[in-house]
């Protein structure tokens, strides 16, 4: 959707518009940009940000610009003008969409240098001083490191995914009241004074990495502490280390692992889950399905665990069967809807069941539970559901 569409959708949701009258100083700066031939579109001054931690942004196609104006702050008037001048610099540079985090933050540097150049050329140094440029460039270096670490935690180094992960992780920083130095160290897993800090950043709400979701159908009141019922495995610093290692491996790989696409119906894929390499393959598939496939569709995700209660307290380990089911739905203006199904199956074999690996897997799934449902059933029910798919394809050998 365009910026105009987003603002209209938000107006309908809130029952009021968040677009403010444009302050004369902002309008004058915007008109100067137009007079200089900079291809800006429309200007929207907003009473609230469209994304937590973001002061403003622009649309590459239209040149439309929005800035958040915080009238409660004594520095609000200066902040909104500084934000606007920076976005004008972005539009002037006509930078292509960045393909890497490094390129993304190199563009930030170019934009801030251009902002300083515009301030001097337009004799508006009071809006953006040499000290401001120095401070922004130093902060850009810090943000680059944080985004790179956030991308690793997301298992996805695309600039948009890394940015969304970073913004979601800011909630964790605010909750624990960490300084920027403590936050950066926690993201990178090197908080020697606080091992828990290295752990909790793994549990950020991953639903923020995708724009459109269907709300989960199941009541989640009991899922916070024990989402997989009696089969919920304890979470320790060891499982956190395994998950961090696997996510970094997934992030470092090219995101080209795709499930076979089938217009005729579900495309199930079967995996064994016995070691970190297995876990990285499964998580790479789920990241691709959740973050990359059909981004304009709404996604409903359902996790299921099939295990035999009779084997829970016996000496022999029990096999566990997991299913991840995805339903992508979009409807056009005529209310004609398209539904696409995807399905993954994971078997944790009884003979080689590694609780550390499975606990790391459960920890990963739990970070999606804001937008996904989870259920547990007996193993026989799972095998009944899986069998029709296995009849038409051979299991991969281990």
Image (tube, rainbow, N blue to C red):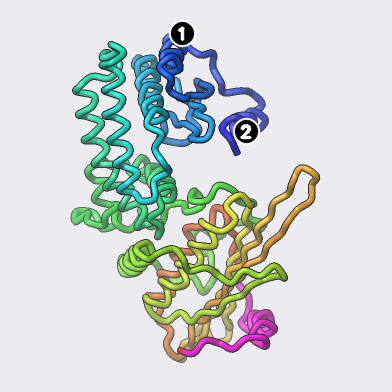
Q: Can you tell which quarter of the image residue 376 is in?
A: bottom right
Residue 26 in sight in this render: no
Instruction: Sort mark 1 into few (<14), some (14-19) or many (20+) by Cα contacts within 10 Å.
Output: few
Q: Position of residue 197 (x, y in %)?
A: 29, 53
**What is the C-alpha distance between the residues marked 1 and 2?**
25 Å
Q: Is residue 308 magenta?
A: no
Please name the residue that numbered disc 1 is placed on: 24
Who's the residue at 44% across and 20% down the image?
Answer: 69
Question: What SS does tag 2 mark?
Answer: helix
Q: Position of residue 259 (x, y in %)?
A: 56, 70
Residue 204 image point, x, y percent: 42, 52
Q: Is residue 38 visible?
A: yes
Residue 251: image x %, image y %?
A: 37, 61
Q: Residue at x 48, y 82 (%)?
A: 272
- In the displayed structure, would residue 315 be above or below residue 183? below
In which quadrant of the rendered image does the N terminus lie?
A: top right
Q: Which residue is mark 2?
A: 5
Q: Which residues are magenta?
A: 376-397
């Amino acid at each position: 959707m365009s910026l105009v569409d987003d603002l209209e959708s938000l107006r309908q949701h809130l029952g009021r518009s968040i677009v403010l009258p444009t302050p004369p100083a902002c309008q004058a700066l915007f008109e100067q940009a137009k007079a200089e031939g900079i291809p800006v579109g429309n200007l929207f001054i907003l009473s609230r940000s469209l994304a937590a931690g973001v002061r403003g942004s622009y649309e590459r196609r239209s040149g439309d610009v929005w800035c958040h104006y915080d009238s409660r702050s004594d520095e609000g008037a200066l902040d909104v003008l500084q934000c606007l001048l920076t976005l004008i610099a972005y539009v002037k540079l006509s930078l292509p969409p960045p393909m890497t985090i490094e390129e993304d933050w190199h563009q930030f540097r170019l934009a801030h240098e251009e902002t300083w150049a515009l301030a001097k050329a337009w004799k508006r140094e009071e809006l953006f001083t040499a000290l401001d440029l120095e401070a922004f460039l130093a902060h850009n270096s810090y943000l680059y490191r944080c985004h790179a670490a956030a991308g690793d935690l997301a298992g996805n180094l695309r600039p948009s995914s890394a940015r969304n992960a970073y913004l979601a992780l800011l909630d964790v920083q605010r909750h624990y009241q960490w300084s920027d130095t403590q936050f950066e160290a926690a993201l990178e897993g090197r908080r020697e004074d606080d091992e828990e800090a290295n752990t909790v950043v793994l549990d950020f709400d991953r639903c923020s990495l995708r724009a459109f979701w269907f709300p989960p159908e199941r009541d989640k009141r009991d899922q916070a502490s024990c989402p997989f019922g009696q089969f919920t495995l304890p979470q320790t610093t060891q499982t956190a280390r395994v998950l961090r290692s696997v996510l970094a491996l997934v992030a470092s790989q090219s995101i080209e692992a795709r499930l076979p696409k089938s217009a005729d119906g579900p495309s199930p894929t079967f995996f064994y889950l016995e070691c970190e390499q297995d876990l990285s393959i499964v998580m790479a598939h789920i990241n691709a399905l959740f973050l990359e496939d059909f981004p304009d569709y709404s996604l409903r995700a359902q996790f299921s665990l099939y295990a035999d209660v009779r084997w829970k307290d016996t000496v022999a380990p029990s096999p566990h069967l997991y299913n991840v089911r995805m339903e992508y739905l979009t409807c056009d203006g005529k209310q004609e809807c398209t539904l696409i199904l995807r399905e993954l199956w994971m078997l944790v074999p009884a003979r080689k069941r590694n609780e550390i690996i499975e606990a790391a897997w459960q920890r990963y799934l739990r970070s999606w539970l804001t937008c996904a449902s989870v259920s547990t059933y007996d193993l026989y029910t799972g095998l009944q559901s899986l069998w029709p798919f296995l009849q038409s394809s051979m299991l991969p050998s281990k």
